Amino acid sequence: MTEPRWLDDLEMRAWLGFVFTRDLIAAAVGRDSLRIANLTYVEYTVLARLADAPDHRRSFAELAAVLEWSQSRLSHQITRMEKRGLVARESIPDDARRTAAVLTPKGAEVLDTAAPAHVDSVRRNMIDVLDREQLAALADIYDTLLAHHRRAGDPHHATRVRHDS
């Protein structure tokens, strides 16, 4: 058995910085969204991905791929959001075995209320804290990490990143 490659101080600082800031920023944005629109961070994300789709609908497979979630997780989330009247399930006409998630008028109204506060919170909690050079570097870093994890055909890399918040 080979000896593990332990993280050095810089590597540990980078890893823990990512873990803690991701959790802190997501929690702060989520709290703001709940306070302003009674909408969780996850609900906002689902509504936004439906709103930017043609006819405000996506098949479950497409929505799961866009969100980078499992279809099981998506199905549970959609069930919770259906109970609130934010989304609906509809059969796909040309394939009765497939289902689409559709943004309801209530969901669109809630999203319209939440969006300005959401972007303000994202700015306040992340974007405006960084200067343009830092922001560009961070965007480049995330592009590299996302490409690494989305690499198709490599059994040693995840093809889907799971976001739990």
Image (cartoon, helix red, strand yellow):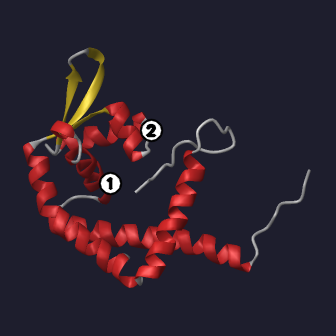
Residue 103 percent across, percent down from the top left: 17, 42
Looking at this view, is 131 or 79 the one in front? 131
Left or right, 15 with respect to 101, comes to: right
How many numbered marks appear?
2
The answer to which quarter of the image holds residue 152 is: top right
Looking at the rendered structure, the kind of residue marked 1 is: Val
Query: Label 2 belongs to which residue?
Result: 70
Q: Quadrant of residue 9?
A: bottom right
Q: Secondary structure at mark 2?
A: loop
The residue closer to the viewer here, 143 or 159, is 143
Identify which amino acid the numbered label 2 is placed on. Ser
Mark closer to the chain start, 1 or 2:
1
Above or below residue 117? Residue 60 is above
State whether residue 55 is above or below residue 163: above
Q: Is residue 164 left or right of residue 4?
A: left
Q: Gap in Å between the C-alphas at discs 1 and 2?
A: 14 Å
At a point 46% along the width and 73% down the height, the residue shown is: 136
Is disc 1 placed on a helix, strand or loop?
A: helix
Residue for point 79% across, 67% down:
6
Q: Residue at x 32, y 43 (%)?
A: 77
Q: Quadrant of the C terminus?
A: bottom left
Can you tell which mark lies on residue 42?
1
Q: In the shown orientation, is residue 79 left or right of residue 150? A: left
